[in-house]
Image (cartoon, coloured by chain):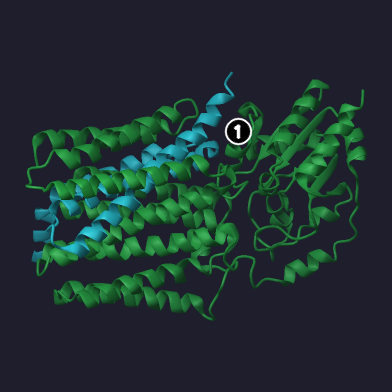
Amino acid sequence: MTELIDFISKNLQLIYILILAIFIGVEVIKNIPAVLHTPLMSGANALSGVVIVGAILVLLHADPNNIVALILGSLAIILGIINVVGGFAVTNRMLQMFKKKRK
Amino acid sequence: MSITLSILYLIATITFIIGLKLLGHPETAKKGNLIAASGMGLAIIGTIFLHELEVSNFIYALIGGSILFGAIIGWLIAIKVEMTKMPELVSLFNGFGGASAALIGIVEFGHNLGNTTQIIPIIAAIVIGSITFSGSMIAWAKLNGTMWKDIRLPKYNIINNLFFLGLLIFSAFIVWSNTNSNLIVYGLLLAALVYGVLFVIPIGGADMPVVISLLNSLTGIAAAITGVLYGNMVMIVGGILVGSAGLILTFAMCVAMNRSLANVIFGAFGGDETAPAENGKKGGTIRKTNPSDVAVMMNYSDKVIIVPGYGLAVAQAQHVIHELEELLTKKGVEVSYAIHPVAGRMPGHMNVLLAESNVDYDKLIDMDDINPQFSNTDVVLVVGANDVVNPAAHNDPASPIYGMPILDVENAKSIIINKRTMNPGYAGIENELFFNQKTSMLFGDAKATIQELLSELKGMQ
């Protein structure tokens, strides 16, 4: 029990952020018309590519002689950026089509 | 971390929230996407340049090269992909995000020998990241049709759940034992990858969108966990946003199909239940028709509703159907499209496909709004849709889609169904609508058939 309290007091800020972010996510997405579900899904998917920030940090902290870390880190960056660039680009392409019809 | 970088991350986080919010309205969606994308760009550039570390040029070159390489690939895929392939694409990109998180976890495990507080997020990133990766790849292969539809090991539910439990215990053991053995972590990676495969393989085709959305949500969580590892706010908040938004979207889809999430994950869909399908087959004889008869019917109608399905998109018939709609409108016929929430291969997919061929989105009517209109409709033209118009959802409790809200096309005066053959739909269920007295079957490739219908109509006054 003391360990749990210890853990909570150490990570209190983090817990606040988690809870607030969960609610923001739910509130922001609620009541979105079905028309936009596909673009929304691919847009949210692009956002999850934020993991690339971690991949960059891996390489920044990597020992230049640690070949394995360098290879895996680069691979993580490549996969992450494909997720980001591809995700945003394809979402944009889809939404462009919705725009066009408002002549 | 420098204060400039912290502020940059704060700005990026706000753009994510605003971007997601704007994505929720047709008018602002495009702007929302661009805002979120620019925030992401800021976060990436800031991470590379605003740190206080000694970093060699070699590392910079490696980072820059990787980003350039991946960005070009991502861009090319995004501009080349066909809109019918959207679900596959989302699942592919999603898998990449998961793999990225798992790789970060692996590298950090090597850096982090014997540090207890960091080990939990590391292990979680590896496990969740790999499950999302292998799960998404299977989902991609299934949607792509390159893989057998669904494979169910005997007692797959028990096997999967035991496997998952084992995975949790294995993870807990690594955390508790504070091991630094790379071998054990590779074992964990492998086990998580296998679980991802086992998790998605038994899930039926029609439930794939729900799975993709769920996996999307998981990738967000993996990103957030990786963020905890670095105490990086933009990753934590961005990841959690995607996680909770993805979950809401998952539930919205389940509601549209009248299935619980547990049912999707643990229930068999359209697989074992062959009995009701057999009954359906006895439903009677079908009536065939041809394009010129249909043209006559439509020419003298007041109101026509088109029900587009995925088959329409596969046949690339979006453009001819739009031409048909324009021609009929010119002739004074009221035409609209009935869009089921899960028409296509994922929610909202059909809207995208029709938007691609310039269909005015005021003509795309949602299920709840169009259902009362069927009773005063002269002709309903169903193109390449099947399960979303299957009355079994209303009146056959034994059917796997029983309870799913459908388009009530049977209330219309006459129903034309364009299909290539009598094969059952994606979910593999027979459709008694085909045997309805008001139904005429218009067999043939959607594009060619509608083209023929179009030229017949053009010749009429």
Q: Residues within 10 Å of mark 1 (few under 14, many from 20)?
A: many
Give coordinates of residue B297: x percent, y percent: 90, 35
- Residue matched to label 1: B355
Question: In this view of the protein, which residue sits in the foreground, B55 or B78?
Answer: B55
Image side of residue B400 versus residue B287, left or right: left
Q: Secondary structure at mark 1?
A: helix
Question: In this view of the protein, which residue sits in the foreground, B365 or B353?
Answer: B353
What tint does the image give chain A?
A: cyan
- Subunit of mark 1? B
What tint does the image give chain B?
A: green
Residue beneath the point at 12% across and 62% down:
B117
Image side of residue B445 versus residue B45, left or right: right
Residue B177 lies, with reference to residue B250, above or below; the image says below
Q: Residue furthest bottom?
A: B154
Give coordinates of residue B427: x percent, y percent: 65, 60
Residue beneath the point at 29% across and 55% down:
A76
Residue beneath the point at 44% across and 63% down:
B135
Name the amino acid type tagged 1: Ala
